[in-house]
Image: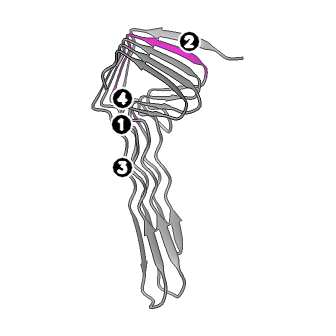
Amino acid sequence: NEKTVMIGGLTISGGLADQGGGISNAGTLTLTACDFRDNRTKDGVDKSDSSSAFAENAGSGGAIYNEGRLVVNFSSFSSNRTGNGGSASASAIGPGNISANGGDGGRGGAIYNSAGSLVVRNSTFSNNRAGDGGTAGAFTSVLNAFAFARGGDGGQGGAIYNLSSLSIANTTI
């Protein structure tokens, strides 16, 4: 049973969540004359191990994570961001191969549109950013052993990251 919500004239700031620092939408949501600022998603979790370490990715959708139907009218998004990927380190004293992979930075500094539809009209996006990828280090003290390290990818979509249906009109990004 899908829910429909309309919100007008609301300011959401200082939010922090795993996904969608200000709002996580899975229904039908219409936002009019709203202000989203200084919201963010959490950083990925760091990992450390003796043989392999895989850090977690950061959350996506600094202000809004959408997997429903989202309509944004006459609203502003400023200084929202996604978290940075977690860092990974692995080290070994004995023989064997080790690996470490940093987590990816979050996507969609202001809005992450997953499987839903997004319509943005007459709105402004400024100073939003996607998170950085996490670092990785793999160290071994044994000759003839292999150490693999891969840093995480930086986040994508400083303002909007879209995987589905998107319509933008009369908007400054």
State if disc 4 and disc 1 touch (CB < 8 Å).
Answer: no
What is the quadrant of residue 164 in the picture? top right
Residue 47: say if magenta. Answer: no
Using the image as rendered, state which of residue 95 and residue 115 is in the foreground.
Answer: 115
Reading the image, the residue beneath label 4 is 14
Q: Could you say whether the residue bearing mark 1 is in a helix, strand or loop? A: loop
Residue 34: say if magenta. Answer: yes
> Residue at 39% across / 30% down in the picture?
110
Q: In the drawing, does residue 114 fall left or right of residue 84?
A: right
Q: Is residue 71 above or below residue 63?
A: above
Q: Is residue 100 above or below residue 1?
A: below
Percent coordinates x, y for residue 149 in the rendering: 44, 69
State if disc 2 and disc 4 touch (CB < 8 Å).
Answer: no
Magenta-tinted stretch: 27-40
Q: Nearer the viewer, mark 3 or mark 4?
A: 3
What is the quadrant of residue 5 in the picture? top right
